[in-house]
Amino acid sequence: MGKSEMELGFVSVAGFGGQRRRGCAIRMSDGPPVSPFASKGKGGASLEKSLVEIEREKNRALQDWLGDNGVYMSDRSGWGKAPHGLVISNETTDEGEPCGRGLLAKRDITQGEPIFEIPVELCLTKAKAVEVFDLPEDMNEYISIAILLISERNKGSDSFYKPYIDILPSDEDLNPMFRWPKEDLELLQGSPVVGAAKSLEEKLTTEYNEINESLFKKRRKEFPEEVFNYESWEWAFAVLFSRAVLFDPLSFEDQELGLVPYADLLNHNPFCSAFIERQKRMFSKNKFVVVYADRNYNKMEQIYTTYGQKANSEFAILYGFVVDRNPYDSIDVTVALSKDDPLYDVKVEYLKRIGKEESIAFPIYADRSPVEMIEFLRFCVADEEELGIGVFNRMVTVQNELAVADMLVGCCEDALAAYSTSLEDDNALMSDRKMYTMFGKNARMAIKLRRAEKKILTRTIADIERRRTKPKDLFS
Ligand SMILES: C[S@@+](CC[C@H](N)C(=O)[O-])C[C@H]1O[C@@H](n2cnc3c(N)ncnc32)[C@H](O)[C@@H]1O
């Protein structure tokens, strides 16, 4: 049984008005970060009450549905079972940002305790989709589950999954970066994340067009255009990217993608190690998805999971949020052979032979640069003699090591110069809390993300400058 990692965006954006800063329009919200359930204006109190009540009813319906379908939801201990220990909160926050629903401990929970167990039959998987729609066996898992999800949402009250579908974020509340409007992406001018977000959107469009031609149009009765259109396709993928779990990721044969009702209410904490496992039971052919507590939790504490050791850019693109305290944050920096290098042709020829490009993007972190990048840089800056040594996994010569430092500093400086704002500008924007909270959610995430990237680049430069006097220790 391998660890499963949530691959995962919900976001509610209130973008009104506008402010210009160095050519970038920043959309403002009409107030501080708000929960999707908060109300505004006259008559707000009663509206809020009813919205809150509606969302609570959805939670109750989900919990009843889980109980009716084999999940132990009782408040009492059962045979070998502790009372169900969770309650759904509709208004969780992290770093001052609303996170939507989340799961809280209803009682003290002990480290290692199985917090809940969901029968695999309740999960939405490719196998289910193939069963319902007779889809081609070789169809991609994401596409198969997206088709099932769109179909179940459209069934409304007739869907077995209704209580689950009802708690999924709506189209407006689902705002991963690949769905951001152009003006929000402009706030990230210079960041490599913009290209990545656009490329994901293009990929989704291409895939939709292909499936539309090869399946939907050919089986129109089953896949009517008013249901299986690009809007629902994008919604389904945004749900999948932000909520699906990969079971048994380490086993090529057993790994499987699935949406796991209830488990997908767990929010992300980079310091959490709680994992989601699919297990087989003794004396039963049924499998369960189990979540274990990674530590002791006090009553009313939020229970988290980890969505994996991802960079903020990945969280933004797939889930629509960014975390400041992300120890795994990185930024891709592209390093390349110089065309002015007298040995350019020889080096390109060599790289071709070993199947490498002459320009490669590497992730750099606040506290380290990848060994492979340093090796590649040593090769890129090598003179004829150094090239003859042919070993780049350690310092070649002092001169070569210092040339690597120069090149890396140059790449980081170029990357910093590409943004339309400086780190100081972003620090000032974020430290003015009143102003910062007035921005729409996308704008807040964009500022947070570009600031985090600039911090990594600035730290890398400072670190190299500090170590320059001891070339042997520069990259060892
Ligand atoms: C798997 S769902 C978790 C349940 C979700 N909060 C809901 O309301 O259904 C993932 C989504 O929760 C939100 N989220 C999870 N962890 C977060 C965090 N640390 N900060 C901000 N938003 C978070 C994001 O919108 C993300 O796309």
Image (cartoon, grey):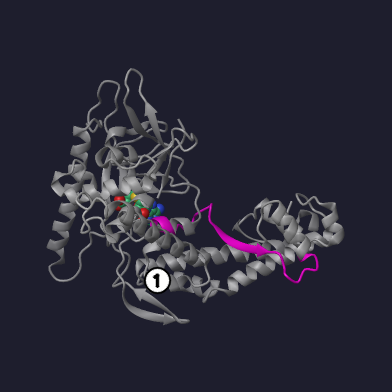
Judging depth in this view, the residue of 469 and 335 nearest the camera is 335
Residue 403: x and y, percent? 77, 64
**Residue 130 shown left or right of residue 45 in the figure:** right
Q: Residue furthest top?
A: 283
Which residue is pictured at 42% across the width and 33% down the height? 111
Q: Label 1 crowding class (10 Å Cα cut-off): few <14, some 14-19, many 20+?
A: many
Question: Can residue 131 be seen?
Answer: yes
Query: In the shown orientation, is residue 201 left or right of residue 394?
Result: left
Q: Quadrant of the N terminus?
A: top left
Residue 366 colored in magenta in the image: no
Place of residue 115 in the rendered image (x, y in percent of width and height, measured from the top left):
34, 34
Which residue type does callout 1 highlight? Asp
Q: Residue at x 38, y 39 (%)?
A: 297
SS under mark 1: helix
Compared to residue 117, the image places residue 264 above or below, namely below
- Judging by the rendered image, the residue that carries numbered circle 1 is 184
Q: Main secondary structure of the magenta part?
A: loop
Q: Which residues are magenta?
A: 317-344
Q: Residue at x 56, y 74 (%)?
A: 418
- Residue 212: image quadrant is bottom left
- 181 relative to 68 in the view: left or right: right
300 or 192, which is in the foreground?
192
